[in-house]
Amino acid sequence: MFDKSNWTTKEYIGLTIIPCEFTIGALIHKLPSLLNNDILASCVNSGIFIIGFLIMIFLFKDFLKDEWKNYKEHKLWRKLLLNILFAAGIFAILALSRYIGNLSINDSDSLNNTTISFMLISSIPPLLAPFAEELTFRYLLFGKFSNKFFKLLMLFVSSILFGMVHINNFSGQWLQTIPYMIIGLYLALIYYNSKNIWASIIVHWIFNTFNSILPALFIVIMKLIGAV
């Protein structure tokens, strides 16, 4: 069950990082200076993610080092290839649950310098998010529980919360976060079976890279070489 003696001050602090990111981001983005300035809003959002990322890395650096040492000991390349397959599974989940159409830039005429800058800056949060999110939702809100009932309960609670923190990705439409709740459950099962946080971090990072970062970089490169 939940045992306070198993929790450290760093872990309690770690639980506050994502809620703070979410709250500060929501409040800051209501400022008049950001409402009509996508570049500035994206810079602020990326700054919040960078600060949260650095804090989480500082808090859990020893834990991450120990987990990585164990993770790479046996057949690392086999594990990485397996993680790629698991990341493909996330795309399958999205394909089954909703139409994949996250990239809203469809008109090549809109790919001006401002749009390119916005896309590059916006690729920073997906690059960093897997670390804080996996440590929070998979380790702290799931892995720390030993009692079978509470572990099963937190499997679903942590997955629901994981989906809910992505609400800003869908302009406040809660129904659109359900696929991410399913992804949260999927990542939790990967962590549970691997017994190592790096398994879910890497799967999450691979998915974000192919879903957000690489498409953005591809469009930017095509624009720069004049192909679009």
Image (spheres, rainbow, N blue to C red):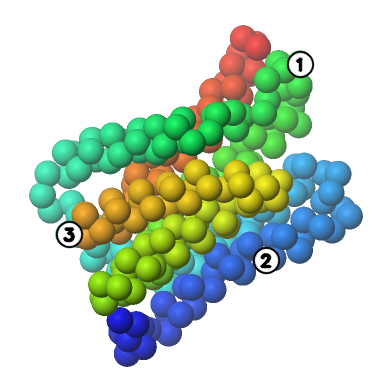
Residue 150 location, x and y as percent?
Answer: 33, 74
- Residue 56 lies left or right of residue 73; in this view the side is right
Looking at the rendered structure, the secondary structure element under dot 1 is: helix
Q: Are marks 2 and 3 in contact (CB under 8 Å)?
A: no
Q: Name the element at disc 3.
A: helix
Q: Is the C-beta separation of discs 3 and 1 under 8 Å?
A: no
Mark 1 and mark 2 lie on one chain; the one further toward the N terminus is 2
- Secondary element under disc 2, as helix, strand or loop, is helix
Q: Which mark is residue 109?
A: 1
In the rendered structure, which amino acid carries the disc numbered 2? Thr
* Residue where numbered disc 2 is placed: 23
Residue 47 appears in the figure: yes
- Give the number of the mark in front: 1 or 2: 2
Measure the C-alpha gap from mark 2 to mark 3: 35 Å
Percent position (x, y) of residue 151?
31, 70
- Specify the amino acid type for callout 1: Asp
The residue at which mark 3 appears reads as 70
Q: Is residue 153 above or below residue 7?
A: above
Q: How far is mark 3 from mark 1, CA to CA?
A: 49 Å
Residue 38 lies in quadrant:
top right
Is residue 199 or residue 188 the one in the foreground?
188
Q: Residues within 10 Å of mark 2 (few under 14, many from 20)?
A: few
Say whether disc 2 or disc 3 marks the residue closer to the N-terminus: 2
Residue 16 appears at what percent x and percent y?
A: 54, 73
Residue at x 23% of width, y 38% of height:
82
Q: Residues within 10 Å of mark 3 (few under 14, many from 20)?
A: few
Mark 3: amino acid = Asn
Please give the name of the residue rendered at 66% of the width and 44% of the height, measured from the top-left corner.
170
